[in-house]
Amino acid sequence: MANHKPQPVKTLRMAKVQVAIWENQGQKGPFHTVTVSRSYYDEEWKHTDNFTAGDLLTLAKLLDQAHSWIFERQAETVDS
């Protein structure tokens, strides 16, 4: 039996910043969570959840896009 690693339902990237959107199942139905990370190179590619001041606007833009994507999915669920 192969290990199935959960994957985000949507990944948004800009420069070295990434926002992953995850779908979870709760008692009241599906809900979404978000994880954020930044890639950097230190002899190999690594990820961190720490951001520099220069990353903040990029992070804010990606979080805004994630928010819009989640609410569009919720509207589709309500409409169907």
Image: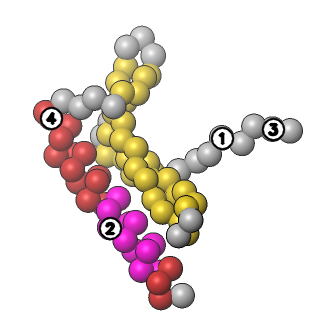
In the image, the segment drawn in magenta is 66-76
For marks 2 and 1 on the same chain, the one whose residue lies earlier in the sequence: 1
Looking at the rendered structure, the kind of residue marked 4 is Gly
Cα gap from disc 4 to disc 2, whole angstroms? 23 Å
Q: Amino acid at mark 1?
A: Lys
Q: Work out whether residue 9 can be spotted.
A: no
Locate residue 4: give its quadrant: top right
**Outermost residue toward the bottom in this view:** 79
Q: Earlier in the sequence, mark 3 or mark 4?
A: 3
Say whether residue 44 is left or right of residue 27. Answer: left
Task: Write down the residue under mark 3.
Answer: 2
Residue at image x 39%, y 74%?
72
Q: Is residue 49 above or below residue 6?
A: above
| 77 within the magenta span | no
Q: Which mark is residue 39?
A: none
The residue to which callout 2 is attached is 68
Q: Determine whether label 1 and label 3 are within 8 Å by CB.
A: no
Image point (43%, 53%), residue name: 33
* Residue 58 visible to an observer of this rendering: yes
Label drawn at residue 5: 1
- Camera-side mark, 3 or 4: 3
Q: Which residue is mark 4?
A: 54
Determine whether 59 is above or below 75 in the image.
Answer: above
Q: Residue 27's image quarter?
A: bottom right
Quarter of the picture holding the N terminus: top right
User: Disc 3 to disc 4, how far (Cα)?
Assistant: 40 Å
Tell me the chief SS of the magenta region. helix
